[in-house]
Amino acid sequence: MSKAVAPHIELASADPSIAQEMARWLAHLGAERRLSPKTLEAYGRDLRQCLDFLCAHWGERVTLERFAALEATDVRAFMAMRRADDIAGRSLMRALAGLRSFGRFLEREGKGKVGALSAIRAPKVAKSLPKPLPMASAKRLADADERAGEERETWILARDAAVMALLYGSGLRISEALGLKRREVPKPGEGDVLVVTGKGNKTRMVPVLQNVLALVQEYVAMCPYPLPADGPIFVGARGGPLSPRIIQLAMERLRGALGLPDSATPHALRHSFATHLLSRGGDLRAIQELLGHSSLSTTQVYTGIDSERLLEVYASAHPRR
């Protein structure tokens, strides 16, 4: 296996040895750990912020030797500074995870052991439950007629409705839906399963409803651009790749039309898929497989949503009230 090529990085707050190791670390995470570009960008940004802080904190540029001798008080001071900037606990937890990853990388490469990072407790993160949509509202989002008054081409309205139908009908992430190739989506009556590529390039099989396939086929028939079998099935207004932002904007317009809260996002349709399945007796492990969660604990958050809904029903309808 060929080694990943490390990008060139320059740091005003640290000497070239740190910049070189940072570049090698990010290249390793991308090639060997297969972390997403967004995660790599966040990890790189967190480390830069830490180095900038340490440079100001110590009054000198950070060297590899000084970073390896980092003390717990230095890490706590950095975390306190970030918290003072009103950074959420989840972002602080990610920052600490990135710094620990960099520290482990330095240790494996024989560049010193940053023991202080393992001595710091991860910040507590308040568990926030996803906000699913009511079943009727989720279905209306996949109805192109709901946006009939907009000055948009009919095929674009049909495309957006088909994408949202896949998010709700099959519980896809928006990146998974937009990553589907035309040959991967069966025509109505010719199949009922999608093979989806999710996080970490892992593939999974998910069922797809015939009425959802009908919406996709309706869009395909109206699309003015050629849709080759090995190309993306969903394209933008000019025939190029469809940006997730376009679907997010479409959702924002629909929120206003349907009177839905700001929490009604494309990802909320995936939450709704899981919650509605669970409320109808779906098995948690089966839902885990459908969503592509690597851990059951990730899926278990939906039990909290469903319990919350049941308690609301109990509180409003119990005969003792």
Image (cartoon, rainbow, N blue to C red):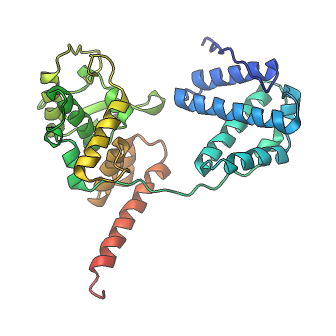
User: Would you place residue 44 above or below residue 57 in this image?
Assistant: above
> In the rendering, at what x and y percent does residue 290 appear?
34, 42
Using the image as rendered, state which of residue 252 and residue 235 is in the foreground: 252
- Numbered-mark total: 0
Question: Does 83 sit above or below residue 321?
Answer: above
Q: Residue at x 83, y 32 (%)?
A: 67
Q: Is residue 120 left or right of residue 7?
A: right
Residue 320 quadrant: bottom left
Q: Residue 208 vs residue 51: left or right?
A: left
Quarter where residue 176 is shown? top left
Viewer-nearest residue: 7 or 213: 7
Q: Is residue 66 left or right of residue 142?
A: right
The quadrant in which the N terminus is found is top right
Answer above or below: position of 285 versus 199: below
Q: Residue at x 30, y 72 (%)?
A: 313
- 173 or 78: which is nearer to us? 78
Can the viewer see residue 71?
yes
Say if residue 286 shows up in the picture.
no
> Where in the figure is residue 187, as x and y percent of width and height?
15, 27
Quadrant for the C terminus, please: bottom left
| Residue 182 in picture, x, y percent from top left | 24, 21
What percent of the width, then of the height, locates residue 174? 36, 35
Q: Residue furthest bottom?
A: 320
Q: Residue at x 65, y 24 (%)?
A: 26
Q: Camera-side residue: 1 or 279?
A: 279
**Image: 262 above or below 167:** below
